[in-house]
Image: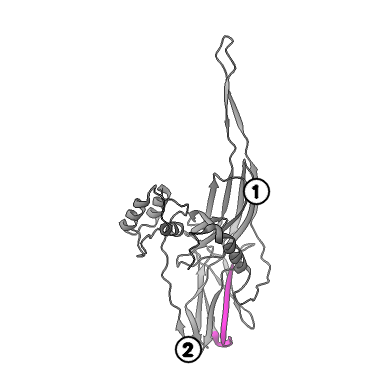
Amino acid sequence: MINFFQEPRKFSALFLIISIFFNFYFFSGKVFSESVTSSVKVEIVTTTTTTTTLGGGGGGGGGGGGYTTPSETKVIFSGRAYPKSTVTLLKDAQIVATTIAGSDANFQISLTNISAGSYIFSVYSEDNNGNRSTLLTFPLSVTSGVITNVTGIFISPTIDVDKSEVKKGEVIKIFGQAIPNSDITVIINSDEEIYGKTQADKIGAYLYNLDTVEVEMGEHLAKSRATLEEEISPLSRVVSFKVGAKTVLKELIAKIVKADLNGDQKVNLIDFSIAAYWYKRSLSIVFKSIEAERLNGDGKVDLIDFSIMAYYWTG
């Protein structure tokens, strides 16, 4: 199996192509052709360079020296995800920063010390069940001495089902997480599309019970999207299920716990000792992938990673 983090240059382009493809298409080849209005805005703020002159002493002294305050080059991403969820920022398919959305679902990520150039930035979030949103992609040209604000990001809902196969006539639960109090549209993509409506609660959780009495037998695909006032999110990832002659509960995949470095679903002194070992050391190839997935993702272990660990601490 290819480890993306071991050979990022070789596979970054492929990763971006695949992720963009899945944002618009089902793996079955069917397309959701409905247009979605975007609330994302890009604002360019030019910073100034200030030169301060230090005057010489009295009595005809020599001219003063001076120093220059360098212009700031920064990209800031802000928007809404799910309350207390992890929001991840990628630059050219590499994780460069993560943050935790507030209890109101708002988030902001600032990327500093970035060189001028053209980049493809991407943002995604993960809900409390370990399900991820779709990848939102922003091609940007960064100019030296300029602050670029990308605002109005509306993370798509997550989606999952409780059964991989449901007996015709029974109910299948379709659920996920979105922006709190948003209106959720669940789209069942089959021979005839079915549109279901529900609402996310105050923590963003939503549930739609699909009665399969009127649903034809066979494979089905589902996506969801959120609407809040006049804003509409992108479509979620696709989830599949089958309407058949029996009911089969979906196997739950063990959730990856942020900051859990040894995979025991806990964050405690064992994880702290692992992180302490790698503190300010060059990471091994194996641990680089762990750090990218479960810590800050900047290729090193520092105080930022320990603060993430403190946030997720279970003891």
The stretch in magenta equals 212-225
Q: Is residue 67 above or below residue 130?
A: above
| Residue drawn where x is 60% and y is 69% of the image | 22
Q: Is residue 180 above or below residue 51?
A: below
Q: Which one is nearer the viewer's eye here, 128 or 283? A: 283
| Residue drawn where x is 62% and y is 34% of the image | 49
Instruction: From the viewer's perspective, tell me whether residue 232 is left or right of residue 301.
Output: right
Q: Is residue 37 above or below residue 196?
A: above
Q: Is residue 224 magenta?
A: yes
Earlier-in-chain disc, 1 versus 2: 1
Q: Position of residue 295 (x, y in %)?
A: 43, 56
Q: Quadrant of residue 46?
A: top right
The mark total stands at 2
What residue type is disc 1 on?
Glu
Give the number of the disc on residue 43. Answer: 1
Quadrant where the C terminus sits is bottom left
What residue type is disc 2 on?
Lys
| Residue drawn where x is 61% and y is 74% of the image | 26
| Residue drawn where x is 41% and y is 48% of the image | 302
Disc 1 and disc 2: Cα gap in Å?
54 Å
Pointer 2: what residue?
246
